[in-house]
Amino acid sequence: MKKFIYLAMAAVMLLALAACSASGAKDTLTGTAEEILLQLKESPGVDLGMTMDDEITADKAEYALGLTAAQFAEYADSAYEVAAAISTFAQSNVLVKCKDVSAAAEVKKLIAAGFNSNKWVCVFPEQSVVVESGSYVLLAVGKADTTNALVEAFRSLSGDNIGSPNVFYTFDDGGDGDIEGGFGGDIEGGLDIDDLIVF
């Protein structure tokens, strides 16, 4: 009887361990990248303002995701972007539907390593974060509260089945009001991120 109890406890522990280690590793989402991203856009707590929505193809992958056209073709089935039409902050949110779970893990790494968070002229994001759920990868770039709300909406839509969010970029003016590294150098004179407006 004791052996049976020990075996049952061991089996339960193994199942629990497997469930914890596989977070984000199974598909609980269904639909196209466009359908899912548009659901996220309409989620409670997510306010993206006026957006321009577009399909991302291999020829747009480097600018939108930091992936080469060859990487996009190898790992992705499709991708869709919802980006700010007019904003004082850079904002781009892209959902990639990958060929499978292992491709999604690779795409997440490639985006974190290759995406240029300073690609915009005159506006900057507060943070860039990438997270996966099964074969889907979400890149959220913009204000921290907006990107965090998108990640939470992604978590909710996937049934709490996401991997660890990777915040791979955060805006930092160094506390001195100067924006470091933008425009090929520093912007002197106490420029604050809230003063940057595109007309």
Image (spheres, grey):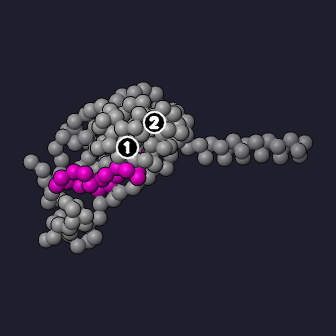
Q: Residue reaching furthest bottom?
A: 176
Res. 197 in view: yes
Q: Is the residue marked by circle 2 packed among few (<14), some (14-19), or many (20+) residues within 10 Å?
A: many
Q: Position of residue 134 (x, y in %)?
A: 51, 37
Q: Amino acid at mark 2?
A: Tyr
Q: Residue reaching furthest right?
A: 1
Residue 64 occupies which quadrant of the picture?
Answer: top left
Q: Is residue 129 magenta?
A: yes
Where disc 1 sits, the SS reads: loop
Frontmost residue, 49 versus 128: 128
Q: Position of residue 14 (x, y in %)?
A: 71, 44
Where disc 2 sits, the SS reads: helix
Q: Residue at x 83, y 46 (%)?
A: 6
Residue tagged 1:
67
Counting labels gives 2
Q: Position of residue 139 (x, y in %)?
A: 37, 44
Q: Is the residue marked by circle 1 packed among few (<14), some (14-19), or many (20+) residues within 10 Å?
A: many
- The numbered mark at residue 138 is none
In the image, taking residue 80 as reference, residue 8 lies left or right, namely right
Residue tagged 2:
75
Q: Earlier in the sequence, mark 2 or mark 1?
A: 1
Please report contact status of discs 2 and 1: CB closer than 8 Å, yes or no.
yes
Frontmost residue, 94 versus 17: 94
Q: Residue reaching furthest front?
A: 70
Residue 94 occupies which quadrant of the picture?
Answer: top left
Q: Position of residue 99 (x, y in %)?
A: 48, 32
Q: Which residues are magenta?
A: 112-133
Q: Amino acid at mark 1?
A: Leu
Q: Residue at x 16, y 55 (%)?
A: 122
Assign the N terminus to one quadrant of the image: top right
